[in-house]
Amino acid sequence: MPGVSSASAPPDPVKLLNVWLALEALQPQSFPEQAALLGKDVAPSDRAKRGRPLTRALFNFDLASGVMPWETRDGDRRNLNIEDDERITWHVPLGFVRMAPAVERLVSKVEPSGPEREEASGISILALAAFDEEGRALPSKLLLSSFGWACGQVLAGRLDQLHRFVDVEEELRQSLGESLVAVDVNGLRAPTTKT
């Protein structure tokens, strides 16, 4: 037929990239449970007894009590068996999402009567804040998951915006990171506390 090409047009690279970015935003790293975030790591107290260097450790702490991990006995440098010149950086999850109910809600919003349901399990971290040894926030080291933002976009009916996380990520990271910075009466950065 005149005017009709037998070869299909090549895909639009911008549209392909946007679809890929949207899919990435909705596929976070998940873990079976919170304790699995660091794998099968040795407890800090056990490592100190063995004389092995502490490269990472999972510290159980009760945020509801108002005590941050750097304020605990286990988090004291003297109990961690580390050298004086080694730095400690605390990473504290700011939020978790249970994947099964989150994905179920997303799927029901997009395709309420669809026959296929995406399976999900475990938990995912929404944001991971970094603090120095004394508990002062390090906003530039904050890690932010795209999943929380993407969920909000889907639930608000803005599926066409899912590819934009890369455009808004830095502003979100700065805003959230700066909100963690505590200042004392002299205007100097102070350790972050629950309050």
Image (cartoon, helix red, strand yellow):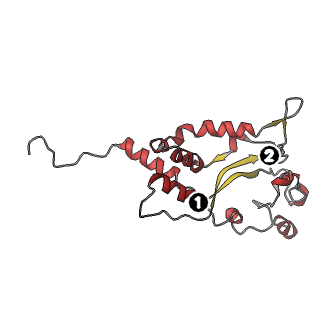
Does residue 29 appear in this view? Answer: no
* 59 is higher (above) or lower (below) than 179: below
Q: Residue at x 68, y 45 (%)?
A: 142
Secondary structure type for disc 1: helix
The quadrant in which the C terminus is found is top right
Image quadrant of residue 79?
Answer: bottom right
The residue closer to the viewer here, 61 or 7, is: 61
Mark-to-mark CA distance, 1 and 2:
34 Å
The x and y percentages for residue 190 are: 85, 38
The x and y percentages for residue 99 are: 59, 60
Closer to the chain start, of discs 1 and 2, is 1
Secondary structure type for disc 2: loop
> For mark 1, does the 10 Å Cα neighbourhood hold few (<14), some (14 to 19), or many (20 or more) residues?
few
* 32 is higher (above) or lower (below) than 124: below
Q: Residue at x 74, y 47 (%)?
A: 130
Does residue 123 appear in this view? Answer: yes
Q: Are marks 1 and 2 in contact (CB under 8 Å)?
A: no
Instruction: Give residue 42's mark.
Output: none
Q: Which residue is mark 2?
A: 132
Which residue in the rendered view is the most extreme toward the top? 186
Q: Which residue is mark 1?
A: 101
* 191 is higher (above) or lower (below) than 28: above
- Residue type at mark 2? Asp
